[in-house]
């Protein structure tokens, strides 16, 4: 679906992106992960034919973005960080307007507007003025306008920017519903959300891809292991002994269980590899109920900081300010 080879983009003498090379297959959800100014937005704008590359090759659905940009635009739905909405229009009017701009007939536009309203769960507010909607609904309308011409590729720039926790969960579910039907590329610096939503991560630092893969693959390559938090019901000492006996487990320690109940405990597990499946089988086989098993949040932070820090930066320490930024749900927008 996407083939990028040796892409560069300059603003005057300043290099915003490059050298950048990656490929994305049909139906994937791929996340661009990086700090503000890393080049995520520039890369998305080039894919959307909103910017031309300075050099290199960018092919979308077999079409070169320089040779035939109008053909690429017909295949791409793009949501910028600020949705391009007209507040005085109703949702339905705006979606018909967006569809007509993209070449659909009046009848096709009306039909397609209804379809994307249902797909993005905004049909209940379709007759409301856009200006009256919450930020979460406006983001959904922004995605709906990107889908209205039935593109093959969906580009989303910070789609959860400024959303509250409930709206973030709703957006995550929406993107999962679109999985497979569309190829989706989204940018973010909110680690937990991009990990929850995407099949694969492309980590950008200073305009270059410095790593790619799933969260597990990046963890195994960079952190040499995995950190888990397990909540279980049963004998604590027996559970710890069972987990310690698994190959690759380095350490097991007690943790505070957020759940309450008779015999409910929690433990931290550090291992050299992903032992989640084996851990569950071993505990259940020993008669211990597994109530929850999650990756450690600090592990995500460590991956992000190691990959996205400035070139030449070697310290694995996570500064307090940087840690806070990676958790923010409304960080300032990048300049490039």
Image (cartoon, rainbow, N blue to C red):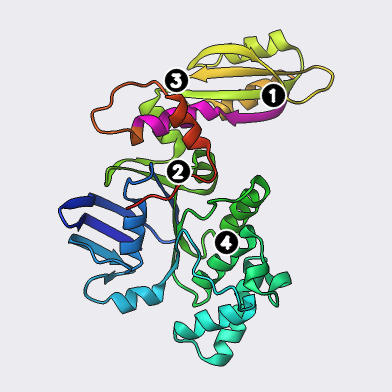
Residue at the disc numbered 2? 189
Looking at the image, the residue that sits furthest to the bottom is: 106
Residue 292 within the segment the image draws in magenta? yes
Whether residue 153 is visible, yes or no, is yes
- Mark 1 vs mark 4, foreground winner is 4
Q: Are marks 3 and 2 in contact (CB under 8 Å)?
A: no
Q: Position of residue 303 (x, y in %)?
A: 41, 31
Label 1 sits on a secondary structure element that is strand
Residue at left offset 32%, top offset 21%: 315
- Mark 3 vs mark 1, foreground winner is 1
Residue at the disc numbered 1? 231
Q: Which range is magenta?
A: 288-306
Residue at the disc numbered 4? 139
Q: CA distance from mark 3 to mark 2?
A: 26 Å
Residue 83, compared with residue 34, is above or below; it is below
- Mark 3 vs mark 2, foreground winner is 2
Numbered label tally: 4
Which of disc 2 and disc 4 is earlier in sequence? 4
Q: CA distance from mark 4 to mark 3?
A: 40 Å
119 left or right of 60 in image: right
């Amino acid at each position: 679906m996407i083939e990028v080879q040796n892409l560069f983009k300059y603003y005057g003498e300043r290099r915003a992106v490059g050298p950048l090379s990656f490929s994305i297959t049909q139906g994937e959800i791929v996340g661009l992960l990086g700090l503000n100014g890393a080049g995520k937005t520039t890369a998305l704008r080039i894919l959307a034919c909103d910017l031309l590359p300075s050099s290199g090759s960018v092919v979308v659905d077999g079409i070169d973005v320089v040779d035939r940009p109008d053909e690429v635009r017909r295949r791409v739905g793009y949501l910028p960080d600020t949705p391009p909405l007209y507040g005085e229009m109703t949702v339905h009017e705006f979606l018909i307007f967006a569809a007509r701009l993209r070449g659909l007939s009046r009848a096709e536009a009306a039909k397609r507007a209804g379809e994307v309203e249902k797909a993005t769960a905004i049909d209940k507010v379709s007759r409301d003025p856009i200006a009256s909607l919450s930020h979460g609904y406006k983001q959904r309308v922004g995605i709906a306008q990107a889908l209205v011409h039935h593109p093959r590729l969906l580009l989303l720039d910070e789609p959860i920017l400024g959303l509250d926790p409930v709206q973030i969960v709703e957006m995550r579910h929406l993107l999962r519903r679109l999985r497979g039907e569309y190829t989706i590329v989204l940018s973010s610096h909110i680690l937990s959300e991009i990990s929850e939503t995407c099949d694969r991560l492309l980590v950008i630092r200073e305009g270059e891809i410095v790593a790619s893969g799933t969260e597990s693959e990046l963890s195994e390559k960079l952190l040499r292991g995995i950190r888990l938090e397990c909540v279980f019901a049963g004998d604590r000492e027996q559970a710890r002994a069972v987990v310690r006996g698994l190959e690759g487990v380095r350490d097991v320690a007690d943790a505070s269980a957020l759940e309450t109940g008779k015999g409910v405990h929690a433990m931290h597990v550090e291992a050299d590899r992903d032992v989640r499946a084996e851990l569950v089988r071993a505990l259940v086989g020993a008669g211990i109920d597994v109530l929850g098993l999650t990756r450690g949040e600090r592990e995500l932070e460590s991956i992000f900081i190691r990959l996205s820090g400035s070139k030449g930066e070697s310290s694995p320490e996570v500064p307090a300010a940087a840690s806070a930024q990676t958790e923010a749900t409304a960080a300032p927008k990048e300049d490039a």
